[in-house]
Amino acid sequence: MNRAPLIAAALLLTMELGTAHANDATGSWEHRGPASSGMWLKTQQVGQKVRFQLELARGGPSYNSAWIEGEFEMHNAAGVFRSTQYGACEITFEFAQSSVRIKESDKKRECGFGYNVHADGTLILKSRKKPKFSDGDPRLNSK
């Protein structure tokens, strides 16, 4: 039995599925660090625009946290969010198929985060579903 057509079809399907995910930043992402530190990211991409909400927590002993939302333009699976709300703030997002690398600019760290809280690290994809965004900072709106 000639399996070449079946193998070719499976490879094409795999390539198409991989491309769809690599070009769409929509999803929920997470990073858990030591001592209750972590990062949680929700993103939704429409065209080239990506809307996001990012929550950050620094572990013990201070347990400081941060929350920020905004949008940026996606180019070649990456985008840069810029804000001047608290000063010069710049965060780079680099998307891969199942992870996103976040890096806060060394010179533009005025994002309004808590003491010693930084947006730096790699988050792992948890879901490709369109996330439900909170109405403002969820740390202030929890019941």
Image (cartoon, rainbow, N blue to C red):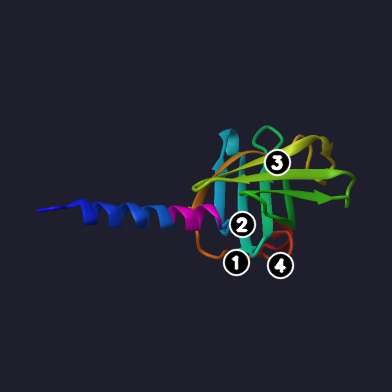
Q: Name the residue under label 4.
A: 135
Kindly identify the amino acid type of the residue bearing the numbered disc 1.
Answer: Lys
Indicate the quadrant containing the C terminus: top left, top right, bottom left or bottom right: bottom right
Q: Name the residue under label 3.
A: 119
Q: Nearer the viewer, residue 92 or 122?
A: 92
Gap in angstroms between the C-alphas marked 2 and 4? 13 Å
Gap in angstroms between the C-alphas marked 2 and 1? 8 Å
Rendering coords of residue 53 (x, y %): 68, 56
Residues drawn in magenta: 17-23
Q: Earlier in the sequence, mark 1 or mark 3?
A: 3
Kindly identify the amino acid type of the residue bearing the numbered disc 4.
Answer: Asp
Which numbered disc, 3 or 4, marks the residue closer to the eye? 3
Kindly identify the amino acid type of the residue bearing the numbered disc 2.
Answer: Lys
Rendering coords of residue 83 (x, y %): 84, 51
In this rendering, is residue 44 above or below 113? below
Say what secondary structure mark 4 lies in.
Answer: loop
Rendering coords of residue 117 (x, y %): 73, 38
Q: Which of marks 2 and 4 is nearer the N terminus?
A: 2
In this rendering, is residue 85 above or below 123? below
Kindly identify the amino acid type of the residue bearing the numbered disc 3.
Answer: Ala
Q: Mark 2 points at which residue?
A: 42
Rendering coords of residue 120 (x, y %): 67, 37
